[in-house]
Image (tube, rainbow, N blue to C red):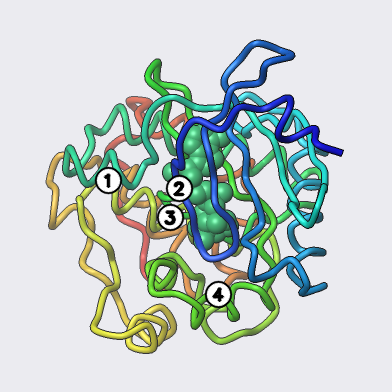
Amino acid sequence: GKILAHRYQLIEKIGGGGMAEVYRAFDQLAKRDVAIKILRQEFVHEDDFIKRFQREAESIATLSHDNVVTIYDVGEEDDLYYIVMEYIEGHTLKQLIQKEGKLSLERSLDIAKKIASALNHAHQHHIIHRDIKPQNILVGENGEVKVSDFGIARTLSSATITHTGSVLGSVHYLSPEQAKGGFTDEKTDLYSLGIVLYEMLTGKLPFSGDSPITVALKHLQENFDYPRDLNPEIPQSVENIILKALEKDPTKRYQSAEEMLYDLETALDPERIDEPRIQLQ
Ligand code: ATP
Ligand code: MG
Ligand code: MG
């Protein structure tokens, strides 16, 4: 078959990570722009990667939510494994933070709520993202926020970390349980969202260092600067959300995306905004 070649006209490469390359393309049948994610050529004979790629497609296809990128088509032809999805014109959250520095309180909360809402939906469908980071959050021109790049498994993330320098950044968003290669559940995504919220509000990462190992160890052992010491405009209620998401012990963290979403939605309520700082365990 030559569906890919006939139906979709590739326009430009728009991204690529450890596992795939992403192109903007024009769907000549549906007459719309699409994004096509294609499994890297070096992996098309590796069953692990093919399975992972297919599972990623299944994960997104299971979900139907305003803040999850919509999948249109998935397939394989002539050793080309591809996922066709809606094209989001805009930036990744990473590019946005690089361009604008820290984001306003209102904007940060709006984006965090939308990510939490997407995670709540995914978790209800027993799908754990495991790779929440600004590079995987698409922010459209009209303010739409879409979580993409679903379903990285532990086995693959450890493989990709050594594969190419371009994915080393992901170690900044790893939960402590991911950093030590232990058991992970939904709460791993809430920790990563806590890091993303910290970064949006302060323009800084809570943990950084010269090597991935250094950063991983910090997730496990070290405290971070209080966000309010870096940006006094952050209300205590919002700092508390970060503190609770960044609990190293998953049993002390938010227990669900729904719980975190509720706190994000009510953080600016007058009776909550000046609540006392929660104690770091
Ligand atoms: P990673 O190594 O981070 O897991 P990946 O190879 O799995 O990356 P994606 O994160 O899915 O690939 O996509 C890579 C980049 O392509 C994104 O960071 C983004 O810039 C761009 N991109 C992906 N999907 C879309 C989309 N639907 N619309 C617009 N841009 C997109
Ligand atoms: Mg990605
Ligand atoms: Mg990925």
Disc 4: which residue:
160
Report if the beta carbon of the residue with label 4 is closer than 8 angstroms to ligand 1. yes
Q: CA distance from mark 1 to mark 3?
A: 15 Å
Marks 1/2: CA–CA distance: 37 Å
Q: Quadrant of residue 141?
A: top left
Residue that label 1 marks: 236
- Give the mark nearer the N terminus: 1 vs 3: 3
**Residue, x 42% and y 31% (percent of image)?**
139
Reading the image, the residue beneath label 2 is 15
**Given the image, on which type of amino acid does mark 4 rest?**
Thr
Residue 171: image x %, image y %? 43, 73
Q: Are marks 4 and 1 in contact (CB under 8 Å)?
A: no
Q: Position of residue 259 (x, y in %)?
A: 60, 44
The residue at 60%/27% (across/down) is 9
The residue mark sitting in front, 1 or 2, is 2
Respond yes or no on whether mark 2 lies under 8 Å from ligand 1.
yes
Q: Are marks 4 and 2 in contact (CB under 8 Å)?
A: no
Tell me the tag on residue 260. Answer: none
Give me the C-alpha separation between circle 4 and circle 2.
16 Å
Which of disc 1 and disc 4 is earlier in sequence? 4
Q: Earlier in the sequence, mark 4 or mark 2?
A: 2
> Which picture quadrant has residue 154?
bottom right
Q: Residues within 10 Å of mark 3 (few under 14, many from 20)?
A: many
Which is closer to the viewer, label 4 or label 2?
2
Identity of the residue drawn at 19% across and 40% down: 99
If you read the primary sequence from the N terminus, does the residue marked by circle 2 or circle 3 appear first?
Answer: 2
Residue situated in front as seen by the camera: 64 or 53: 53
